[in-house]
Amino acid sequence: MRRKMLGLFRPPSAKNNGGFIMTVVVLIVAAIVSVIIIKVALSTLSHLNNADQSLKGEAAKYQTQGCLQEALIRLKRDPSHYVGGVINLGDGSCDITVVGEGDSRALIVVGSLNGYQQNLAVNLTIDPFAVTTWDN
């Protein structure tokens, strides 16, 4: 004697499970792919930000080196009167200080560009009869 079960409590048959399982698999795969894509996008943005910061730091470095070259030229032209000053280059500026007297001097250059700062200090010897030499 078999009892008839009501449709509400009958377990689903294998035929009806195919669509449900496929939907669950597609949702799981879509979630995994979405997580991977978001991780790659965030990693790329982080890498681009680091590269941008590095480029801005390099620009500040090159600007400061340019200011140092300009200060050396000015010091060579007028070693007795040049004491430094401020040089504006493009969007940035450099503060130059000349320390010392006579033939032995030191140039201190502080350059700033786009919120980045670069410091350079150079010791040099001034010889009016020879090429100016320096060491850093």
Image (cartoon, rainbow, N blue to C red):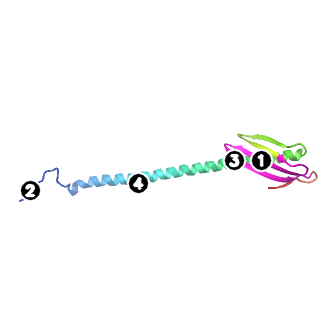
Q: CA distance from mark 3 to mark 1?
A: 15 Å
Foreground: disc 4 or disc 1: 1
Label 4 or label 2, whichever comes before in sequence order = 2
SS at circle 2: loop
Query: Residue drawn at (25%, 55%), measured in percent from left and top?
Result: 17
Asked whether, in this view, residue 11 is left or right of residue 36, the answer is: left
Find disc 1 in the rendering and name its residue: 109
Foreground: disc 3 or disc 1: 1
Q: Is residue 111 magenta?
A: yes
Q: Nearer the viewer, residue 66 or 26?
A: 66
Magenta stretch secondary structure, dominant: strand
Query: Residue drawn at (54%, 49%), measured in percent from left and top?
Result: 45
Foreground: disc 3 or disc 2: 2
Q: Quadrant of residue 94?
A: top right
Find disc 3 in the rendering and name its residue: 59
At label 1, the amino acid type is Val
Query: Residue drawn at (20%, 56%), measured in percent from left and top?
Result: 13
Q: Which mark is residue 32?
A: 4
Which residues fall within the magenta stretch? 98-127
Q: Quadrant of the N terminus?
A: bottom left
What residue occupies the far bottom of the structure in this picture?
1
At label 3, the amino acid type is Ala
**Residue 28 placed where, x, y %?**
36, 54
Label 4 or label 3, whichever comes before in sequence order = 4
Label 3 or label 2, whichever comes before in sequence order = 2
SS at circle 4: helix
